[in-house]
Image (cartoon, rainbow, N blue to C red):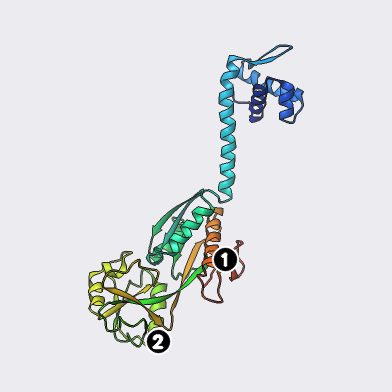
Amino acid sequence: MADNFELRHLRAFVAVAEELNFSRAARKLHMVQQSLSAQVQQLEHELGVQLFRRTTRRVELSEAGAVLLDHARTILQRVTSAAEEVRRTAAGETGRLVVSYTPTLVNETLPRLVTAVHEQWPGLSLQMVEMWQTESIESVRAGRVDVGMARPAHVDEDLESVRLRDEPIGVVLGERHPLAGRPLLTMEDLANSTLAIWPRQFSPDFFDQVVDSFRGHGFRGRIQEFEYLTSALFHRDPAARAEIAAGRAFSVAFVTQFDPLPEGFVWRAVEPQTLIPVQLYWSRGAGAAVRRFVDVAVEVSAADGWLSPGRSAASSPPGPTAAGVSGQVG
């Protein structure tokens, strides 16, 4: 049973088989001829066959040697490929990442990041999973998801995070609403209307930031939580859609969120602005592939000017990557 020969024996054999000359093969491998001959003899001894027919004038492959040559080339190529794949995986250049995202990120932020990752690291395979904020954070903690994105997402010290984007939130009205013709609204304008929004239990940080900001600027109306929780949000919720269309309620959305808005509704900016951040978060000690994704995301954030003036992901307190991410950002 041939189980003791080594890769160096195969490399020596292939070099001789290709050159059919021990001296040239030794020079090719940068070794002395005596050592090369010894390795070929060890391989022959281990296999129990003669691989070369040697005369004083020439070296020829035996029939057994010709068979081994095909196998040896394949083995050596596979070893080389395996070593390269292992190296690239360890460096985060290949592998698979599962990335969760909340529904409001699907039309701009998410596609921009995915495209950039594919361009820079084509060996990384991405699986994108839509989740609500609370589910996403727990999935990252449990290791079911590698990277999560939500706006906003308060994460504890067991996760690392970086702030990628600040985007002002606006309101969605029925196009027949008395205020629909105005390009800019205040919360005083909508003070006694109903706010239709997704339930707090699924996105508590988002819910609290929006409601607290609106209350602080004059909104006094009631809150109507969606009954249908889909990425389509208000316009797949019959009760919310009817109330908004009738002008008795409004919902909230980002200008990038719908492409386009459903027919019969309009988006309007609100002042003063309420900026909602997008957070990227992952487990401490995550692998190199996660770090690659984070670095690309920070680069895209800076290149596209996603953060409000005076803030940048890279200007956060120093962290474990070149991008400068930190344990709790924003």
Q: Amino acid at mark 2?
A: His
Residue 65 visible in the picture: yes
Q: Which residue is mark 2?
A: 217
Task: Identify the image quadrant of residue 29.
Answer: top right
> Who comes first in sequence, dot 1 or dot 2?
2
- Vertically, is 14 above or below 106? above
Q: Position of residue 256 (x, y in %)?
A: 40, 69
Q: Specify the label residue 309 is tagged with.
A: none
Please name the residue shown 55% across and 47% down the image: 89
SS at mark 1 in the image: loop
The answer to whether residue 119 is left or right of residue 24 is left
The crowding category of the residue bearing disc 1, from other C-alpha atoms within 10 Å (few below 14, some 14 to 19, many at least 20), is many
Viewer-side residue, 179 vs 190: 179
Q: Amino acid at mark 1?
A: Val
The answer to whether residue 27 is left or right of residue 179 is right
Please name the residue shown 74% across and 28% down the image: 27
The answer to whether residue 136 is left or right of residue 312 is left
The answer to whether residue 156 is left or right of residue 250 is right
Q: Position of residue 227 (x, y in %)?
A: 27, 69
SS at mark 2 in the image: loop
- Which image quadrant: the N terminus? top right
Q: Position of residue 13 (x, y in %)?
A: 65, 24
Q: Position of residue 45 (x, y in %)?
A: 65, 18
Task: Identify the image quadrant of residue 192.
Answer: bottom left
Residue 208 visible in the picture: no
Q: Specify the label residue 325 is tagged with.
A: 1
